[in-house]
Image: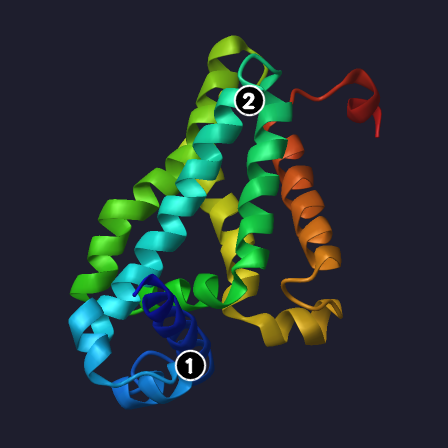
């Protein structure tokens, strides 16, 4: 029974990425998963249920990994914590590029589902970065920046390439979701954060 559900979810993720949510029918999902079409209604109550399950599984896994990482790095300097948290976000999105892209497409359209995703998940997604920056400001390691603005800029940098993979290929000549791309994106985001958050050294001031 569980294997059937996984096959349906895997098939749906593949088809949603290729054809979009609206362009994918329940029958196409059933054919791709090689199951009876009635099983999709039985397990997920239809196509939207499949989409919601994919999203919930994605975010639940991400938040579990963030929680485990936070426990592991507690007590380290804030910038080092931030570097590891950003690295987790970037690599998780690379490893789940199709679902990442699907979620971002759905969030770009004003729907009841997108509002629910923002309420249930994106607030926690933002908090995973914001709380590290807040702690760094409180300890004096970081400059007293406008945290929401920095977090918005960081999330935009992390998410945008997955929504527009062709741009990454043509402009940056990198393959989205590759290890090379993940390393480049992580380094780029950390360079931005270093400029925003860390006090300027005497050497930097003379440049």
- Residue shown at the point (62%, 16%) measured from the top left: 77
- Please, is residue 120 above or below residue 134 in the view? below
Q: Is residue 170 left or right of residue 132?
A: right
Question: Which one is in front, 160 or 57?
Answer: 57
In this figure, which residue is indicated by the disc labeled 2? 72
- Residue shown at the point (34%, 39%) measured from the top left: 124
- Please, is residue 121 above or below residue 115 in the view? above
Question: Is label 1 in a helix, a strand or a loop?
Answer: helix
- Dot 2: few (<14), some (14–19), or many (≥20) neighbours within 10 Å? few
- Residue 185 position, x and y percent, is 66, 51
Where's the C terminus, which quadrant?
top right
Q: Is residue 99 left or right of residue 86?
A: left
Cα gap from disc 1 to disc 2, whole angstroms: 37 Å
In this figure, which residue is indicated by the disc labeled 1? 15
- Residue 130 position, x and y percent, is 43, 31
Question: Which one is in front, 33 or 169?
Answer: 33
Mark 1 near mark 2, Cβ–Cβ under 8 Å? Answer: no
Query: Along the polypeptide, which appears first: circle 1 or circle 2?
Result: 1
**Residue 19 visible from this viewpoint:** yes
Question: Is label 2 in a helix, a strand or a loop?
Answer: helix
**Residue 105 visible from this viewpoint:** no
Question: Which one is in front, 138 or 10?
Answer: 10
């Amino acid at each position: 029974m569980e294997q059937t559900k996984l096959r349906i979810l895997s098939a749906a993720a593949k088809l949603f990425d290729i054809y979009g949510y609206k362009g994918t029918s329940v029958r196409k999902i059933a054919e791709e998963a090689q199951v009876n079409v009635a099983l999709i209604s039985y397990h997920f109550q239809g196509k939207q249920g499949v989409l919601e399950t994919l999203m919930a599984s994605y975010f639940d896994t991400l938040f579990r990994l963030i929680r485990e990482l936070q426990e592991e790095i507690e007590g380290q300097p804030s910038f080092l914590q931030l570097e590891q948290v950003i690295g987790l976000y970037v690599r998780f999105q690379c490893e789940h590029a199709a679902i990442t892209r699907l979620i971002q497409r759905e969030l770009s359209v004003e729907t009841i589902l997108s509002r629910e995703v923002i309420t249930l998940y994106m607030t926690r997604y933002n908090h995973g970065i914001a709380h590290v920056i807040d702690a760094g400001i409180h300890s004096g390691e970081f400059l007293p920046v406008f945290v929401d603005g920095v977090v918005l800029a960081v999330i935009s940098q992390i998410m945008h390439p997955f929504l527009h993979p062709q741009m990454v290929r043509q402009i940056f000549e990198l393959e989205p979701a590759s290890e090379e791309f993940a390393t480049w994106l992580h380094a780029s985001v950390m360079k931005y954060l270093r400029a925003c958050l860390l006090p300027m050294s005497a050497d930097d001031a003379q440049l």
